[in-house]
Image (spheres, rainbow, N blue to C red):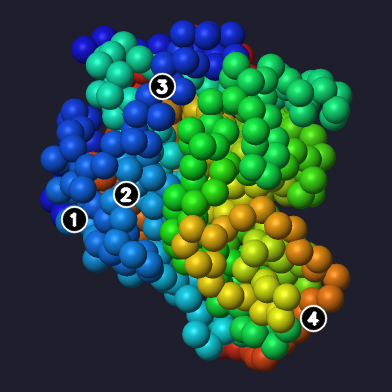
């Protein structure tokens, strides 16, 4: 099968509409797992395929690697951040292709650094937030394809970090949680200029490309900044509740690909290698990635995916 | 579970099967509570010495224990797992943000309470009256010759 092309969600209306339609189909699809079967309290309720991605993200985040420390987890705050989310995005893409009956569908991305070039006020009314795209902010949002009652949050994390059942409309609150603006082009350029993928201590204290792009060094940067700027349901560990989550991460994945393909750049490199300490289990090159609804993979297998998908542009 | 290609075409049956095989781990991981507070251990080596710093945090809001996992990274920033994209230089500021993000978890009588299903609405309760107490119970620095 030929590689699919991932394109800009704002400028490619066809890809955007397919994504919206596909998300709604996955949100309505009930493959069998229930809240009881996954230990979520309350009455037994079937969990949709889309919501299983939310549960998966939460579980990976709650799995410390290793359990004796409280920084790195199985998907964040360490080297595996980029390959794990690439794995997650690809699983969503495969499921969207399935329900859309369209094997040529490529997950679109949101080039948030382009919006970051706008004024702080204009960022809140950028095209991505218009009713024909993802809708705007609110508690709950009241415009766009994901406003209630057509799209409802069913599972979320509470203040103690446990999954709970709920039933409310999607929430967003732009620029009020500590990040008043989106990242800019200078910020993405700073990430791409990094020469090393990751470095000891392999955590949120590290130098290197991964930690720069994840948004810990410099603080409240890039990926983290987008979550915090959007606010609402993008803040807890169940942030995939907002379909914009995958547009953010697809752009993060695009920036990673841009870094690997940079002329004269590092190439498709990854660290730590397999010889590193056992305390880095889950983050080394051939370690198994956390999975929930598919087979598993490794960071090594996520380094070159050009046979599966390509981006229409690597200008970030 | 067995390693199988993640590129196999998913189906309702395959999804149900994989989720079932991963259910035990899912149950275990998604209930990561700190019954006795968050113990944070940081370690490093310096000039032939092995340094271990253990810090125990207990967080209360209006006298009720906050049960999520609190961490401190090597640079000294604190973070709280339920708001995973933020870090803070002050644990007190961090808990204020937790109250902002989860207003319905803190009822008028104070303290974190579980949210009942189907009743999670959008009210923004005042956080001004909340009493926050964060205690750092134990900090130990151990050095040994390498």
The quadrant holding residue A180 is top right
Same subunit, labels 3 and 2: the answer reads: yes
Which corner quadrant holds the N terminus of chain B?
bottom left
At 23% from the left edge and 36% from the top edge, which residue is drawn? Answer: B6
Please state which of residues A296 and A170 is positioned toward the viewer in this rendering.
A170
Residue at 53% across / 26% down in the picture? A145
Q: Residues within 10 Å of mark 1 (few under 14, many from 20)?
A: some
Of the image marks 4 and 1, the number of the one nearer the N terminus: 1
Same chain for labels 3 and 1? Say yes or no.
no
Q: Chain of mark 3?
A: A
In this rendering, position of residue A209 left or right of residue A26: right
- State the residue in front, A269 or A218: A218
Which of the 4 quarters of the picture holds residue A42? bottom left
For label 4, the residue is: B131
Q: Which residue is mark 3?
A: A21
Please provide percent x and percent y for residue A116: 76, 25
Establish whether labels 4 and 1 are both on one chain. Answer: yes
Callout 3 touching callout 2 (CB < 8 Å): no
Circle 1 — which element?
Answer: helix
Residue A58 vs A148, above or below: the answer is: below
Q: CA distance from mark 3 to mark 2?
A: 19 Å
Residue under label 2: A47
The residue that disc 1 covers is B20
């Amino acid at each position: 099968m030929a590689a699919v092309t991932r394109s800009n969600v704002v400028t490619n209306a066809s890809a955007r509409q397919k994504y919206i339609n596909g998300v709604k189909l996955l949100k309505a699809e009930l493959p069998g797992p229930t809240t009881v079967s996954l230990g979520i309290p309350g009455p037994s309720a079937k969990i949709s395929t889309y919501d299983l991605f939310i549960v998966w993200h939460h579980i990976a985040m709650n799995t410390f690697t290793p359990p004796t420390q409280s920084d790195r987890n199985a998907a964040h705050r360490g080297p595996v951040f980029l390959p794990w989310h690439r794995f997650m995005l690809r699983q969503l893409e495969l499921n969207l292709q399935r329900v859309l009956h369209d094997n040529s569908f490529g997950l679109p991305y949101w080039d948030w650094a382009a919006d970051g070039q706008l004024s702080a006020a204009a960022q809140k009314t950028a095209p991505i937030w218009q009713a024909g795209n993802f809708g705007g902010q609110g508690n709950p949002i009241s415009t766009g394809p994901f406003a209630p009652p057509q799209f409802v949050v069913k599972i979320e994390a509470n203040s103690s970090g446990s999954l709970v059942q709920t039933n409310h409309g999607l929430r967003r609150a732009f620029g009020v949680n500590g990040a008043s603006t989106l990242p800019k082009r200078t910020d993405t350029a700073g990430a791409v200029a990094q020469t090393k993928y990751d470095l000891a201590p392999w955590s949120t204290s590290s130098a290197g490309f991964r930690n720069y792009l994840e948004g810990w060094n410099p603080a409240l940067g890039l990926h983290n900044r987008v979550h915090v700027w959007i606010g609402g349901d993008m803040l807890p560990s169940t942030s995939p509740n907002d379909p914009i989550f995958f547009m953010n991460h697809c752009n993060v994945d695009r920036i990673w690909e841009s870094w690997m393909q940079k002329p004269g750049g590092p190439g498709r490199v990854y660290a730590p290698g397999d010889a590193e300490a056992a305390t880095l289990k889950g983050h080394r090159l051939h370690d198994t990635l956390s999975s929930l609804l598919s087979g598993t993979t490794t960071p090594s297998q996520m380094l070159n995916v050009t046979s599966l998908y390509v981006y229409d542009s690597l200008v970030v | 579970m067995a390693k199988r290609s993640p590129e196999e075409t998913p189906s309702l049956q395959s999804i149900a099967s994989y989720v079932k095989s991963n259910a035990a781990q899912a149950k275990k991981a998604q209930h990561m509570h700190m019954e006795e507070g968050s113990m944070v251990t940081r370690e490093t080596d310096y000039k032939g010495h092995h340094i271990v710093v253990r810090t125990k945090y207990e967080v209360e809001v209006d006298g009720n224990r906050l049960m999520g996992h609190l961490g401190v990274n090597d640079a000294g920033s604190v973070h709280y797992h339920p708001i995973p994209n933020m870090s803070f230089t002050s644990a007190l500021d961090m808990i204020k943000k937790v109250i902002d993000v989860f207003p319905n978890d803190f009822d008028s009588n104070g303290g974190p309470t579980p949210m009942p299903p189907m009743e999670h609405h959008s009210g923004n309760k005042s956080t001004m009256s909340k009493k926050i107490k964060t205690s750092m119970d134990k900090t130990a620095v151990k050095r040994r010759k390498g």
